[in-house]
């Protein structure tokens, strides 16, 4: 174990029929809210109506800021900051998936400073304070509902940058599994890939010689996410599968998986961001392309780690580490294909000839995130394993 | 999954050499503290000196209230409440194990009301507010450092009562594994039994037909606690074992093990409290006596659940549930004996002829806690399995 601090003050309200509690939670933090959401899905499934009724009943006035994109962009964030400042709003109510919650965090941080919100992403400024945020989650995947992290894409440069800060933890997040019953199969699969990768980044890259708490936490949740995904794909209204997926995805990226394992890196996120940034691919779809390729490349250096994954998650029985690792990676790739999330550039409609450009973007991000072990040549090699 | 709320705002500061941060954390909440601790152990191992130096350096004045007993008592709690009121203290700094932290919570709650603090335990009053608490944990076992629960024993009636309340979560808890290097082997064993039972109460008594998140969380932590305990008993200065035990014991009772599993009961705690209440036995020692007996009795009704435990925790390979359950329970009892925590009344010096009296106390507690399925006859039968 390594030293760590863990502080996660987000209140989770979990269960069927809890959307109606958003007004009461919001009212704890103010009377004038920015109501942030995406496009049509929350209107189609009734969540919009429930949230609006609850806010009104609790006496929370709100200004709507709809239209958050699935890879949320800086321009829309800046508009949100402007509205909050102009209307002197006191809190943000975010209803949607990780994109909406991420943008809510950026607006919450940008609204209390004079400088441009993008300065936080380029590390010119750090977040010391933010407006309170209350969320209603409708797509389990990113874990943003119970952490302080966010990712925003710059409209012009297409840079997809992220950071985390304590004050950006939502004050309360409402997790009502019934809001996810309409999430279509492709997004169910992307969400599985996303939350599994969240768990596996630290699992594969930490250097703690003995981390049984965190390793078992990760292995248990990865198996659970796989089982829940299969239940949901078999029956979109499987309440056990939907509820389990929702809580598992939250637990996958609320920092418990890596608290105490010491330094770790996010190589798959570094390699994926350029894909969804440049080609408007779903983040989870990009991850299911990158992850098995990165594992294949990394298993050459650390076969034991990837063999453990194969044995614990896929029950691979094989004493040779390199061979066990290989079978585990193949099993993961096969499972991604089975659930319908891409594992190749072709499936994700990414031109193979763009690899140098993609790698350049990844290198740039690696510099920002302190991941410096990958040369352009190494990245080319890994990306070629996705072709 | 069942509906739940999860809100755990305690900040954890984990790592070697972190005791010196107590002053800075305390200073966030006030300038005048009650400094609560037990008897001599924190003076012998240097933790007292480090804490005092840190408080002084941060400008936190304090009034000492030493002498917390290992089953903390009401009279000492009431004295603490009086000191806080008289000196108008602003926060509690608790340095010690779960007993010290539990008493800190009782004092924190009692200090802000006019009525007697025992009214909270008899459910005549509920906690709405409390003084802030900052803790330095020196004995991992009870999980009190990251939850809102506490247990206090009434000096005269020997009633050992407990409850939990949100405002009683410590604001910050400092977990420095080096403070536990002097914990002797018997207490290492009791702590293992204690934290394992915390995990297993909901695991064995919930009725969720599919709870893979929580079940795997419990199984992983139980295995980890067993491995860490063995490392510590082999070498008291094993830094991996001590650190892992410390964080695992915290995670065992911070409500993550049961968030979402629906209603569950604490039968082993109900049956143990009279033992440590009446005979001044360590709580963990009482639990290692009661748990295998209760499992034996309960496995008759629900063999599948106990068979799963046997297979996942002790790798028992046996298709018959009843037989697998039996072997798992025997393995657990043997392991408790191996590490040196009692599994029989004789080992715990509890007179078998007291069973009726002990059962009466358990029934009383069961009424308070809403555990009503056990008749005196059933309890006699379970207690007789401990003889």
Image (cartoon, coloured by chain):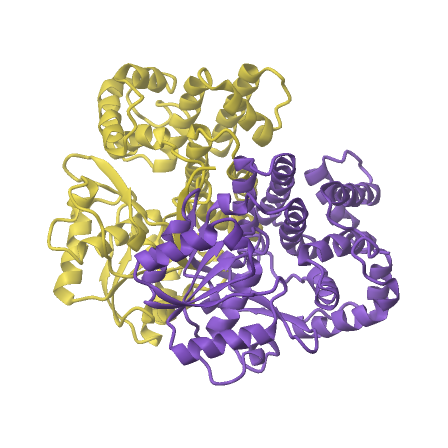
Chain colours: A purple, B yellow
Q: Is residue A139 left or right of residue A382?
A: left
Residue drawn at 47 percent across, 31 percent down? B208
Residue drawn at 20 percent across, 66 percent down? B89
In the image, residue B375 above or below residue B52: above
Residue A207 visible from this viewpoint: no
In the image, residue B62 above or below residue B154: below
Quadrant of the drawing holding the C terminus of chain B: top left
Q: In this view, does B277 lie to the left or right of B187?
A: left
Q: Which residue is farthest right?
A: A353
Residue A363 drawn at (x, y percent):
76, 72
Residue drawn at 16 percent across, 49 percent down? B117
Q: Is residue A196 left or right of residue B14?
A: right
Residue B284 drawn at (x, y percent):
38, 36
Instruction: Pick the residue in front: B370 or A145.
Output: A145
Q: How many labels does the image show?
A: 0
Q: Is residue B177 left or right of residue B121?
A: right
Residue drawn at 71 percent across, 42 percent down? A339
Residue A198 drawn at (x, y percent):
63, 54
Q: Which residue is farthest bottom?
A: A114
Residue B86 visible from this viewpoint: yes
Instruction: Pick the residue in front: B285 or B347.
Output: B285
In the image, residue B375 above or below residue A39: above
In the image, residue A74 above or below residue B80: below
Residue A261 drawn at (x, y percent):
60, 56
| Quadrant of res B157 | top left
């Amino acid at each position: 174990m390594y030293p760590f601090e863990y502080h996660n003050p987000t209140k989770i309200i979990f269960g069927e029929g809890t959307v109606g509690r958003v007004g009461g939670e919001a009212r704890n933090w103010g009377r004038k809210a920015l109501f942030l959401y995406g496009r049509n899905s929350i209107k189609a499934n009734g969540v919009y109506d429930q949230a609006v009724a609850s806010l009104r009943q609790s006496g929370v006035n709100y200004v709507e800021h709809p239209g958050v994109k699935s890879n949320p962009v800086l321009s829309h964030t800046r508009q949100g900051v402007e509205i909050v400042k102009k209307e002197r709003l006191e809190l943000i109510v975010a209803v949607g998936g990780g994109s909406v919650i991420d943008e809510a965090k950026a607006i919450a941080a940008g609204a209390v400073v004079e400088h441009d919100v993008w300065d936080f992403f380029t590390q010119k400024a750090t977040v010391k304070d933010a407006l309170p945020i209350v969320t209603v989650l409708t797509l389990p995947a990113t874990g943003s509902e119970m952490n302080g992290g966010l990712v925003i894409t710059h409209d012009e440069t297409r840079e997809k940058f992220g950071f985390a800060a304590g004050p950006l933890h939502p004050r309360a997040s409402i997790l009502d599994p019934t809001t996810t019953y309409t999430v279509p199969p492709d997004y169910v699969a992307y969400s599985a890939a996303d939350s599994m990768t969240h768990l596996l980044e630290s699992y594969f890259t930490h250097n703690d010689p003995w981390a049984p708490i965190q390793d078992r936490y990760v292995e248990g949740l990865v198996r659970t996410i796989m089982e829940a995904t299969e239940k949901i794909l078999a029956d979109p209204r499987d309440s056990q599968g939907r509820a389990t997926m929702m809580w598992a995805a939250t637990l996958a990226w609320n920092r418990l998986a890596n608290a105490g394992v010491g330094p770790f890196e996010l190589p798959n996120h570094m390699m994926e961001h350029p894909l969804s940034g440049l080609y408007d691919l779903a983040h989870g779809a990009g991850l299911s392309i990158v992850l098995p390729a990165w594992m294949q490349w990394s298993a050459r250096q650390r076969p034991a780690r990837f063999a453990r994954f194969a044995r614990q998650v896929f029950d691979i029985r094989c004493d040779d580490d390199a061979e066990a690792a290989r079978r585990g990676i193949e099993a993961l790739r096969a499972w991604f294909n089975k659930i319908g999330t891409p594992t190749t550039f072709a499936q994700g409609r990414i031109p193979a000839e763009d690899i140098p450009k993609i790698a350049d973007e990844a290198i740039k991000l690696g510099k920002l995130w302190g991941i410096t072990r990958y040369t352009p040549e190494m990245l080319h090699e890994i990306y070629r394993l996705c072709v």
